[in-house]
Image (cartoon, helix red, strand yellow):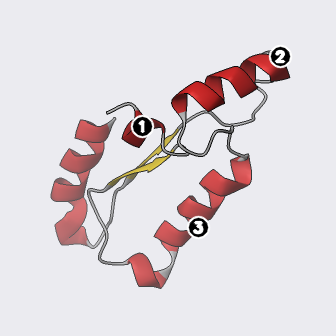
Amino acid sequence: MTGLSRGLAVDLGPEGITVNCICPGPIRTAMTEAVPDEHKIIYAKRRTALKRYGDPEEVAHMTLSLVLPAASYITGAVIPVDGGLMARNA
């Protein structure tokens, strides 16, 4: 996805279209609903810098920020919204 996003950013840039890739980490969604809370806590404490699962709204806030005029010069970016998962496990 990151390669596709970067390629599209290059190809579509001349048309004024920006393309970015948001990479969510562990987020409380319907997909993670079946995971017991105690397992989520253990995973988050071991893997993320913030020691917790994220909320869908936190991903939505990043998405919103990228569609605002203030982000009109951001394209080809890969943005982790993962509570520090990648930073901690790099």
Please state which amino acid type lies under the numbered disc 3.
Leu
Q: Is residue 42 visible?
A: yes
Disc 1 versus disc 2: distance between alpha carbons? Answer: 23 Å
Earlier-in-chain disc, 3 versus 2: 2
Check residue 88 in the rendering and tell me which mark sits there, or answer none: 1
> Viewed as shown, does residue 36 lie left or right of 1?
right
Residue ID at (73%, 24%): 40
| Residue count near mark 3 (Cα–Cα under 10 Å), binned few <14, some 14–19, many ≥20 | few
76 or 58, nearer to the observer:
58
Please state which amino acid type lies under the numbered disc 1.
Arg
Q: Position of residue 63 (x, y in %)?
A: 55, 60
Q: Is residue 35 above or below residue 22?
A: above
Q: Looking at the rendering, which quadrant does residue 12 occupy?
A: bottom left
Disc 1 versus disc 3: distance between alpha carbons? Answer: 26 Å
Q: Position of residue 66 (x, y in %)?
A: 47, 68
Earlier-in-chain disc, 1 versus 2: 2
Q: Which residue is mark 3?
A: 64
Q: Is residue 19 above or below residue 54?
A: below
Check residue 8 in the rendering and tell me which mark sits there, or answer none: none
Q: Is residue 71 above or below residue 48?
A: below
Name the quadrant of the N terminus: top left
Q: Which residue is mark 2?
A: 36
Residue ID at (29%, 77%): 73
Disc 3 versus disc 2: distance between alpha carbons? Answer: 30 Å
> Viewed as shown, does residue 39 lie left or right of 67?
right
